Amino acid sequence: MKFSKAIILKAPRDFVVKCYTDDDTRKKWDSMIVSKENIAGIPLAKGSQTKILFKTPKGSDELYETILENNLPHSIKGLYQHKFMENTLTTSFEDLNEAGTKVSLDVDYFKTHKFIVKVFMTLFPKQFKSQVENTMSEFKAYVEANA
């Protein structure tokens, strides 16, 4: 399943990129993140790996991020591996003017490890999209309140 989402932020691109990529800042706006731990390589460098602990309704769960491409401040692409599925996420930052930035997310859930997850993804794709939309809304609120 592939989809794209975009938002416009009333903040300069450099500030938006910093808020998106800085782990300490991310914990302030991303309500799902419990912790992030670098496990290999230089953080955000191509090939680096991070263990992400995130909240679920039943407690917390692990997700592993591998940076596939880093073209910041323009874009960054990661591979995200979970026990149930794998996806890539490409985040792009477009400078609209001195006080505006367009953030675009291209998500590709390309592998599921459980049949029920594939069924759920097929029947309820909006659930996956709404999670991304919620995170983007949190990000927008934080960036615009702190720009």
Image (cartoon, rainbow, N blue to C red):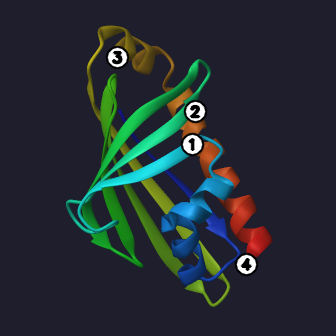
Give coordinates of residue 144: x percent, y percent.
75, 70
Q: Earlier in the sequence, mark 4 or mark 3?
A: 3
Query: Which residue does the numbered mark 2 point to in the structure image?
Result: 55
Give coordinates of residue 127: x percent, y percent.
56, 27
Query: Which residue does the numbered mark 3 point to in the structure image?
Result: 118
Give coordinates of residue 19: x percent, y percent.
58, 69
Mark 1, residues whose alpha carbon is within 10 Å: few (<14), some, or many (≥20)? Answer: some
Give coordinates of residue 89: x percent, y percent.
37, 50
Label 4 and label 1: CA atoms lie apart by: 24 Å
| Quarter placement of the C terminus | bottom right
Report the mark closest to the observer, 1 or 3. 1
Report the mark closest to the observer, 2 or 3. 2
Label 1 and label 3: CA atoms lie apart by: 26 Å
Q: Which mark is residue 34?
A: 1
Query: Which residue does the numbered mark 4 point to in the structure image?
Result: 147
Mark 4, residues whose alpha carbon is within 10 Å: few (<14), some, or many (≥20)? Answer: few
Q: Is residue 87 above or below residue 25?
A: above
